[in-house]
Amino acid sequence: VRRVYFDLIGLPPTPEQIDTFLQDKSPNALAKLVDDLLASPQFGERWGRHWLDVVRFAESSGMEFNFTYPHAWPYRNYVIDSFNQDKPYDVFLREQIAGDLLPAQPHESLEAIEARNIAPSILSFGPKRHNSGGTEFRMDIVDDQINTVCRATLALTVSCARCHDHKFDPIPTADYYSLAGIFLSTEPMYGTIKQKYSNTPTDLLPLGENGPALHAAAEAYEKQLQETEKKLTTQTAALKKAQDAQKLAASAHQKYEQLVATTVVDPKNPTALQGPSQADVDKKKAELEKANAQVTQLTTEVTTLKTKIAELKKNPAPRPQYAMTARDRKKPADTYIAVRGDFREKGDVVPRGFLSAIQIDNTPQIPAGHSGRLELAQWITSEQNPLTARVMVNRIWYHLFGRGLVPTVDNFGLIGKQPSHPELLDDLALKFMQEGWSTKRMIRQIVLSRTYQLSSTPDPGNLEIDPENHLLWRATPRRLEAEAIRDAILTVSGQLIFDRPI
């Protein structure tokens, strides 16, 4: 019972739950318990975390300058909900690679449309050197995208072909740059802003029914506020300049008045007046009046602008929730082979496409104006693709037994380990596809098997023959991971907070 609880929801059973199971003498007691746990909201949290680890989910960029991704959480929720809904695994993959490109279905809800637009976040988070830019920055992002998508879905180390043909697997450099063309034609939207050490800001996906309208209104508000603040800065500087000019004009006018008042007229020669005349005084007075008027006008304008800014800040336009995502660039295009991985050394241009080692009937063709992500998603999830179902079934087995049928769960290539039970892996992979790519159904089938329910008690004879338990003659003891230990401590101490009731 503890094994099933920890494996399916990552939490320990209570003493009462153990007693309830032990008192149920019906032959389907375990099946009922498994069904209850598969229906628990905590199932999606437990198994969603496994997937988040696979696709390197994180809420910051890492690298030299660790910028946060405050809008990564909608993808986390998407993954949890997908596992709880038992979304078919092939649909789950297609949404993450090209959810924004999938056509809307009849009577599709806003929540469903929003979910598949959030799903391509997988292409946007991940490590980035935000202080760099240009082609080098984009090529590093593309390399991370290729590595993530191909390891997660196909368990292949395709990124090894960035600089040269793969040393072990049949993946030529041309195949790498065929995939690179697809991802170079894709714009990741991770949402960092322009600031110091961040040279590549991007947009985000506004969420909610009124999300786009709220976003547009908020952007207009921010623009108005910025323009008003800029105008205030300009007019404040102009006011200071006008006030300085006013002081000079007032001083000149006063000086001229004093000179006129103290000038003595020679009776013998009244026309030989020395110093300024009354006309000069009147001219200085006019200049002073003009300076006064300008100061008065600018003071009024500055006061009005300050009031306007205060009102704007008092009533800011509300913003919607946002999510990271990805979208096609305006001009998708093929790319060239970077000789020895150096983007400055251009080799032949290669058409966007897929791995030549995996051939399927009716391989999707990439239209000229498309990035190719939708076609890539179709190719990866084709039932003729020999790897996709096997890789996921192997991941499920790994999480239930502590070791995959293929021990190297992220590498099915030549230097990966051979499967211990290849026929079993094939059988499970076929059932996985034939039964609708259902993760819950596959987990249920394995958990209800005799192999999963074996005791971990060692047998001296078997230990001598198979000490590593490759033949699965007992349950291999496993350590709980840190997250499960922490949650168990919080659970038994009554401090674990559930977003939704267990």
Image (cartoon, rainbow, N blue to C red):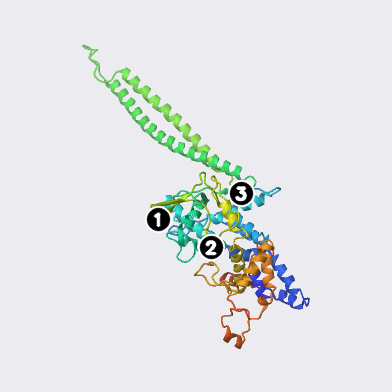
* Placement of the C terminus among the 4 image quadrants: bottom right
Q: Can residue 196 be seen in this view?
A: no
In the foreground, 101 or 80:
101
- State the residue position of label 1: 339
The reply to whether callout 3 and callout 2 are in contact (CB within 8 Å) is: no
Disc 2 and disc 1: Cα gap in Å? 24 Å
Tell which circle, 3 or 2, labels the residue nearer the N-terminal end: 2
Observer-side mark, 1 or 3, equals 1
Locate residue 320 relative to residue 26 in the image: left or right. Answer: left
| Image coords of residue 83 (percent x, y) | 65, 61
Amino acid type at circle 3 is: Leu
Check if mark 2's residue and mark 1's residue have beta carbons within 8 Å: no
Residue 91's quadrant in the figure? bottom right
Give the SS element for disc 3: loop
Dot 2, crowdedness within 10 Å: few (<14), some or many (≥20)? Answer: many
Decide which of 459, 64 is in the foreground and name it. 459
List the single residue furthest toward the right.
26
Query: Which mark is first along the chain, 1 or 2?
Result: 2
For disc 1, the neighbor class at 10 Å (few under 14, some 14 to 19, many from 20) is some
Residue 221 visible, this orientation = yes
Left or right position of 75 against 86 = left
The 10 Å Cα crowd at callout 3, few under 14, some 14 to 19, many 20 or more, is many
Q: Disc number at residue 151?
A: 2
Residue 207's disc number: 3
Determine the CA span between mark 3 and mark 2.
30 Å
Identify the residue at image location x=62%, y=65%. 47
Tell me which numbered mark, 1 or 3, is placed earlier along the sequence: 3
Element class at badge 2: helix
